[in-house]
């Protein structure tokens, strides 16, 4: 009985881990792509940007701040109609990617903007003196110089999404969080709760170590 129970637990944990990886991977991909766009626009239109437009910068900055202010659990509920519109259902692993992505976009947009705006203005002026266009300065100076900092931001994003994905499990999102709640909390199976917690801790540590190593290489 003990072997059967352990085998069943192992299968449940591995299946839920696969769901967590699925949610975190795709929400990271989508949020990085979609978050990069407002980050570039805010960088260009900022008061010290290549093409300052005050109202554009302030509107985008306000929108980013508003969405960053929403607690994730509330955003999950608010986005139920939109999630159903996008994927045809409001619960499940795939459905959870929608609120995960939307919650991550303002976070990574702000991180990318900060990374881009930390670029040395001396390098920017040097590129401009050589006749570089704004597009060339953006791609070859801003983005190129900011890659290590943006990578750090992506690592922070992944770690945050791991926590959010566990929270998504409370509303039927699947993943490690779902197992921890259903088995560990609701059915009082402490071993599930402990194993799920340990897996999440190890997962975060691995992501952070990989990120630190890549940062050193790129720097």
Image (tube, rainbow, N blue to C red):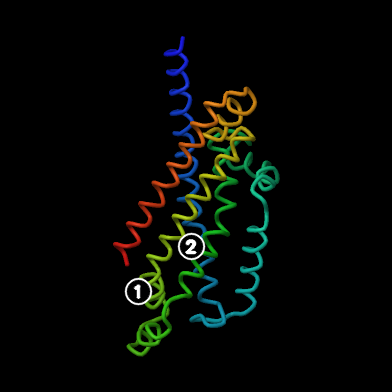
- Label at residue 153: none
Question: Picture coordinates of residue 58 (x, y %)?
Answer: 64, 73
Identify the element where label 2 is drawn: helix
Point out the tag, 2 or 1, that comes first from the N-terminus. 2
User: Pointers 2 and 1 in contact (CB under 8 A)?
Assistant: no
Question: Picture coordinates of residue 8 (x, y %)?
Answer: 46, 18
Question: Picture coordinates of residue 145 (x, y %)?
Answer: 37, 72
Q: Residue at x 46, y 71 (%)?
A: 116
Instruction: Give the number of marks.
Output: 2
Q: Nearer the viewer, residue 126 or 206?
A: 206
* Vertical order, 57 against 72 (above or below): below
Instruction: Return the residue at label 2.
Output: 36
**Along the horizontal axis of the image, is 1 left or right of 101?**
left
Measure the alpha-carbon separation of dots 2 and 1: 16 Å
Q: Nearer the viewer, residue 195 or 62?
A: 195
Q: Nearer the viewer, residue 35 or 212?
A: 212
Q: Quadrant of residue 70?
A: bottom right
Q: Quadrant of residue 169?
A: top right
Q: Residue furthest top?
A: 1
Q: Quadrant of residue 97?
A: top right
Instruction: Return the residue at label 1.
Output: 140
Q: Few, some or many C-alpha atoms within 10 Å of disc 1 (few <14, some 14-19, many ≥20)? A: some
Q: Residue furthest bottom?
A: 129
* Vertical order, 125 against 152 (above or below): below
In which quadrant will I find the C terminus?
bottom left
Q: Residue at x 55, y 53 (%)?
A: 104
Q: Few, some or many C-alpha atoms within 10 Å of disc 2 (few <14, some 14-19, many ≥20)? A: many
* Vertical order, 100 against 213 (above or below): above
Q: Nearer the viewer, residue 36 or 111?
A: 111
Identify the element where label 1 is drawn: helix
Question: Picture coordinates of residue 53 (x, y %)?
Answer: 59, 80
């Amino acid at each position: 009985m003990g072997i059967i129970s352990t085998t069943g637990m192992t299968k449940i944990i591995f299946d839920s881990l696969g769901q967590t990886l699925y949610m975190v991977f795709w929400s990271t991909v989508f949020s990085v792509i979609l978050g990069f766009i407002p980050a570039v626009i805010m960088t260009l239109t900022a008061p010290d940007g290549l093409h300052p437009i005050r109202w554009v910068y302030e509107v985008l900055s306000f929108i980013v701040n508003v969405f960053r202010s929403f607690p994730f659990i509330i955003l999950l509920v608010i986005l139920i109609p939109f999630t159903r519109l996008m994927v045809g259902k409001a619960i499940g692993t795939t459905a959870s990617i929608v609120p995960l992505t939307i919650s991550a976009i303002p976070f990574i947009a702000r991180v990318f903007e900060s990374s881009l705006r930390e670029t040395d203005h001396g390098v920017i002026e040097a590129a401009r003196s050589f006749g570089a266009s704004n597009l060339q300065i953006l791609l070859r100076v801003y983005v190129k110089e900011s890659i290590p900092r943006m990578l750090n931001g992506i690592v922070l994003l992944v770690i945050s999404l791991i926590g959010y994905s566990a929270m998504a499990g409370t509303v039927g999102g699947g993943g490690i969080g779902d197992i921890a709640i259903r088995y560990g909390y609701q059915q009082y199976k402490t071993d599930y709760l402990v194993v799920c917690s340990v897996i999440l801790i190890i997962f975060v540590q691995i992501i952070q170590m990989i990120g630190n190593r890549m940062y050193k290489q790129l720097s």
